[in-house]
């Protein structure tokens, strides 16, 4: 839910926005109101809202100056300007302050609802942290608990063979049926024992091992996504993308793009 403050010197307009707009239906709540920019700045410092809806022309402190001061203090939330003056100069100031929108009075509730829906959506997206190189590698490593499995003295010997083969031959075409045949045991028996030990199927663990290696390879920045897919046993590029996003919640391409940004910043820092 978006927390909103409204800063507007015209009482009838301010009270109309506070009291007559159906904010709850927009997943919003008004947490404060002010009649001038000075009071609005104090309210920003106190409430730390998600959105400030403010008039531009106000006594004591105009909306643009209020926003500039809040920005200088690191207090400026998403900004929506209201004005009766459809003048380009005001729009320019709004753009410079990265305002979410610039609305002319009287504001139509339908237009306001669309804007709040967009700001709510943006806020929800901001809650999801972008995976970095480091935490993606950690996530990939956490997919498999090799140490606890392989160091267990009670580990089923047939399952141990499967685990070792996954570690060493993950690039190859492996299956539980193939390994059962090599060990001259029933595939159903091996499949059951494998899941008892690992809590997942042979195929799932094989996929996770391939992902671990793929993330490490992508992190070097020297391989294309399709090359990583081929070299880690995925074969099909599309299948690799689907599996990568399923387990690590980001596409390989987005991961590479974010890494590219990190490397570019590091290059800039080195040149300072």
Image (cartoon, rainbow, N blue to C red):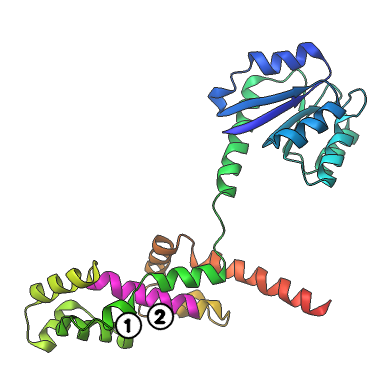
Q: Residue furthest front?
A: 153
Relative to 59, is 132 on the left or the right?
Answer: left
- The location of residue 84, given as percent across then percent down, is 84, 21
Residue 39 in the figure: left or right of residue 233 = right
**Which residue carries the number 2 mark?**
230
Whether residue 208 appears in magenta in the rendering, the answer is yes
Per the image, label 2 sits on a secondary structure element best described as helix
Residue at point 57%, 66% (across, down): 132
Q: Give left or right: position of 125 versus 39.
A: left
Q: Quadrant of residue 75?
A: top right
Question: Disc 1 and disc 2: Cα gap in Å?
Answer: 12 Å
Q: Residues within 10 Å of mark 1 (few under 14, many from 20)?
A: many
1 or 2: mark nearer the eye: 1
Q: Considering the image in quadrants, where does the C terminus appear?
A: bottom right
Residue 142, percent across and down? 40, 70
Residue name at image x 35 percent, y 73 percent: 144
Q: Quadrant of the N terminus?
A: top right
Can residue 133 be seen? yes
Q: Which mark is residue 112?
A: none
Vertical comparison of 31 with 251: above or below: above
Comparing 96 with 160, the one in front is 160
The quarter of the displayed image where residue 185 is located: bottom left
Above or below — where is 66 with respect to 235? above
Q: At x 55% / y 71%, what residue is drawn?
A: 134
Q: Which residues are magenta?
A: 202-216
Q: Which residue is mark 1?
A: 170
Determine the image quadrant of residue 99.
Answer: top right
Q: Are marks 1 and 2 in contact (CB under 8 Å)?
A: no
From the top left corner, tell me how far across and down residue 12 is, in percent. 77, 11
Q: Is residue 114 magenta?
A: no
């Amino acid at each position: 839910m978006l927390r909103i403050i409204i800063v507007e010197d015209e009482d009838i307009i301010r009270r109309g926005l506070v009291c007559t707009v159906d904010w709850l239906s927009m997943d919003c709540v008004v947490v404060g109101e002010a009649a001038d920019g000075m009071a609005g700045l104090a309210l920003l410092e106190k409430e730390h809202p998600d959105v400030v809806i403010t008039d531009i022309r106000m006594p004591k402190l105009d909306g643009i100056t209020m926003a500039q001061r809040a920005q200088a203090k690191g207090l400026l939330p998403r900004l929506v300007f209201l004005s009766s003056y459809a003048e380009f100069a005001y729009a320019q100031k709004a753009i410079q302050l990265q305002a979410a929108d610039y609305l002319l009075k009287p504001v139509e509730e339908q237009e306001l609802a669309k804007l709040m829906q967009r700001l709510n959506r943006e806020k929800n997206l901001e809650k999801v942290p972008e995976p970095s190189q480091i935490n993606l590698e950690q996530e990939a490593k956490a997919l498999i608990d090799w140490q606890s499995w392989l160091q267990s003295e009670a580990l089923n010997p047939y399952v141990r063979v499967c685990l070792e083969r996954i570690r060493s031959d993950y690039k190859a075409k492996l299956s539980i049926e193939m390994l059962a045949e090599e060990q001259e045991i029933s595939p159903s028996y091996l499949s059951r024992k494998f899941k008892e030990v690992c809590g997942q199927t042979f195929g799932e663990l094989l996929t996770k091992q391939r992902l671990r290696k793929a993330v490490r390879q992508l992190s070097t920045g020297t391989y294309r996504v399709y090359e990583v897919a081929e070299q880690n046993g995925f074969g099909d590029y599309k299948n690799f993308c689907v599996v990568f996003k399923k387990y690590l919640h980001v596409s390989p391409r987005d991961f590479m793009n974010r890494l590219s940004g990190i490397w570019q910043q590091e290059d800039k820092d080195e040149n300072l």
